[in-house]
Image (tube, helix red, strand yellow):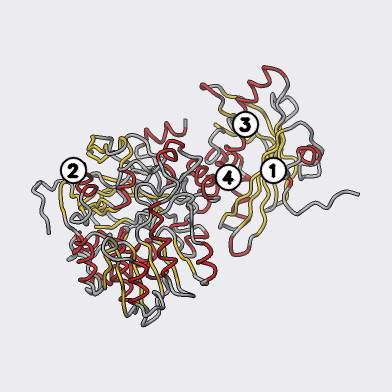
């Protein structure tokens, strides 16, 4: 008989086996990197959903995303920063969408680094909305694969955490906090 | 512009740096007219606060004139404002509860990781106080960029001098919050450890909140004199056994509330796992948590402990047993300055709170390094140094 599992989210499970078996979405994944993060944002669910749904706006708070071109209601083209001025690009499709609740997307079949993400919004009463981001990516094997993976996202777990914080700042405060003193410093910080 | 910059232990300089610019819609640029050196600036001066970088501009007590505003700022050019040292957005859950010093959004996203590592939750942003609290340039300069200028700065009515209102930025609300956190009941006896600016404002605040007696504890005679001026009884801990004196002075009961306004000085900041070098220079014996330890032991059963004092890390020999067995309550935290400013400004206008008594020295910004050294070397006589950019009379005007 299976041991009783607690109520904690799958991304906090200590056992890699469990994580490999289930990414929390019911899909089977294996050998992939799973990143999850939850934040509470003091704004209504519909507003947060609407902002995120327009993928062209994501670079406002996603530091390593240079540009997202919206090609169709479900397809988008992503340009992501790599080291030393390089970049990596791919197309992504929205694979699941529930108005005000959930957006899930996945890279198209020809992506160098297959990746997928989902963002879920839940009401949190007078505290606003609980936003949970899950990102899965699958670095290809070999040296080239490693290099691409490195380019794909610099410290992806840290990046995801900081991106979510920036999303929160933008939605709650209307701007993203910076301690820069001059425009020049701000640009250097973003580079 | 000219600005007081940190370069290392006991090394602060006035440098020429780029002027600040409006970067976000809610920003304002303030031309500084007065700024003070805080006791907590000495912790930076002594090199005990981690995550400082060479060239950081110090100063978190400042005021001035609005010279530039972002599109969403509610300030107008020419207004005189005092700026809270806590940087708060005004729109997150914590700000909604007036817990401004716990603001989720004042600290830039990239700077929040270290707070999570140290404290479990990220810290809010503060001016001029290391990169742990955001890395914001401070106000010991000619100009400063103030984020969220629509919720932070308070506009000062004409007829009030800078020196009367400058301390709304930090130490006055901090002393007030310290007394409020002591949940003072009419007739209470309150003991205050430390007669620095925060302790002295806590003394005044405690009386205003109905304390019958306030007992102030320090070892600098001049500072004890100042406490006496506000009606406090005093204990000089170099001459008197503090615990024994408190027991005798309260008929064996102990003070109803105790306030620790000393905190980390020099070697109290234990941030193990952040800066090993600092840890190595510290004695884990924690001499300087002496004040909070003594306060807990002296406090009456069922009493209240208020701790405005700044602590940074993990301490040893905390009297947890006394704390539990006596059923004490502890309240603490960085000050939610924005919450207290309007009422305290009124108290100043109405003459209920005296602020200018504290200022012992006034000098120009160019003399700031001298001000740091004086404050550091002579805490008995130097109770507060106010810097005024453009102040040319370098003669030191003691009160």
Q: Is residue A73 visible?
A: no
Give the label, 1 or 4, closer to the camera. Answer: 4
Left or right, residue B128 beside residue A52: left
Q: Which residue of the protein is positioned furthest toward the bottom in this rendering?
A: B187
Using the image, tell me which numbered label, if any, was put on residue A118: 1
Going from N to C along the chain, the mark reached first, 3 or 1, is 3
Residue closer to the observer: B228 or B70: B228
Percent position of residue B350, x then y: 23, 74
Q: Mark 2 sits on what residue?
A: B370
First reached walking from the N terminus: tag 1 or tag 4: 1
Q: Is residue B253 visible in the rendered structure shown here?
A: yes
* Circle nearer the viewer, 3 or 2: 2
Q: Chain of mark 3?
A: A
Residue picked out by circle 3: A78
How far across and down, in percent of the image, does residue B253 sit? 41, 78
Q: Of A58 and B268, which appears nearest the observer?
A: B268
From the viewer's perspective, tell me whether residue B131 is left or right of residue B376: right
Q: Is residue B350 above or below residue A146?
A: below
Position of the N terminus of chain B by quadrant: top left
Mark 1 vs mark 4, CA separation in Å:
13 Å
Q: Which residue is mark 4?
A: A164
Which badge, 3 or 4, comes first in the chain's sequence?
Answer: 3
Q: Secondary structure at mark 1?
A: strand
Q: Is residue A93 above or below residue B69?
A: above
Q: Position of residue B240 (x, y in %)?
A: 29, 66
């Amino acid at each position: 008989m299976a041991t009783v599992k607690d109520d904690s989210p799958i991304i906090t499970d200590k056992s890699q086996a469990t994580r490999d078996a289930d990414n929390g979405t019911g899909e089977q994944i294996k050998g992939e990197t799973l990143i999850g993060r939850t934040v509470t944002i003091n704004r209504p669910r519909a507003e947060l959903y609407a902002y995120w749904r327009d993928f062209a706006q994501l670079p406002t708070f996603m530091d390593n995303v240079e540009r997202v071109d919206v090609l169709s209601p479900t397809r988008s083209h992503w340009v992501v920063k790599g080291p030393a001025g390089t970049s990596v690009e791919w197309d992504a499709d929205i694979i699941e969408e529930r108005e005000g609740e959930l957006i899930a997307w996945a890279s198209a079949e020809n992506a160098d680094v297959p990746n997928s993400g989902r963002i879920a919004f839940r009401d949190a009463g007078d505290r606003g909305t609980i936003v949970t981001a899950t990102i899965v990516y699958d670095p290809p094997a070999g040296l080239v694969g490693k290099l691409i993976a490195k380019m794909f996202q610099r410290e992806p777990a840290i990046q995801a955490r900081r991106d979510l914080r920036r999303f929160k700042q933008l939605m709650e405060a209307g701007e993203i906090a910076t301690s820069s003193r001059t425009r020049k410093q701000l640009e250097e910080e973003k580079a | 512009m000219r600005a007081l910059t940190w370069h290392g232990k006991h090394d602060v300089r006035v440098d020429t740096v780029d002027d600040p610019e409006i970067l976000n819609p809610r920003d304002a640029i303030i031309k500084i007219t007065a700024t003070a050196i805080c006791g907590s600036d000495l912790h930076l001066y002594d090199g005990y606060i981690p995550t400082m970088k060479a060239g950081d501009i110090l100063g978190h007590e400042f005021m001035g004139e609005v010279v530039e505003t972002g599109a969403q700022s509610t300030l107008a050019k020419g207004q005189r404002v005092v700026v809270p040292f806590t940087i708060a957005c005004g729109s997150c859950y914590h700000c909604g509860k007036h817990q401004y010093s716990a603001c989720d959004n004042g600290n830039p996203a990239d700077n929040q990781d270290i707070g999570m590592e140290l404290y479990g939750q990220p810290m809010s942003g503060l001016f001029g106080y290391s990169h742990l609290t955001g890395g914001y340039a401070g106000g010991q300069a000619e100009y400063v960029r103030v984020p969220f200028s629509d919720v932070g700065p308070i506009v000062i009515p004409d007829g009030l001098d800078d020196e009367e209102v400058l301390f709304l930025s930090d130490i006055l609300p901090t002393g007030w919050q310290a007394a409020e956190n002591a949940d003072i009941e009419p007739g209470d006896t309150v003991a205050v450890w430390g007669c620095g600016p925060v302790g002295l404002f806590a003394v005044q605040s405690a009386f205003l909140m109905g304390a019958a007696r306030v007992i102030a504890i320090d070892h600098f005679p001049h500072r004890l004199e100042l406490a006496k001026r506000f009606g406090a009884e005093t204990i000089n801990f170099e001459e008197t056994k503090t615990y024994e004196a408190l027991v005798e002075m309260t008929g064996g009961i102990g003070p109803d509330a105790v306030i620790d306004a000393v905190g980390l000085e020099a070697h109290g900041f234990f941030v193990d796992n952040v800066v090993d070098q600092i840890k190595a220079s510290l004695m884990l014996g924690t001499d300087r948590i002496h004040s909070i330890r003594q306060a807990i032991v002296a406090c009456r059963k069922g009493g209240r402990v208020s701790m405005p004092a700044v602590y940074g890390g993990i301490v040893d020999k905390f009297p947890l047993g006394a704390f539990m067995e006596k059923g004490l309550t502890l309240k603490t935290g960085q000050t939610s300055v924005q919450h207290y400013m309007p009422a305290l400004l009124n108290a100043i206008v109405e003459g209920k709170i005296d602020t200018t008594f504290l200022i012992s020295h006034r000098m120009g910004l160019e003399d700031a390094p001298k001000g740091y050294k004086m404050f550091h070397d002579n805490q008995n006589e130097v109770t507060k140094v106010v810097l005024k950019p453009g102040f040319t009379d370098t003669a030191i005007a003691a009160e």
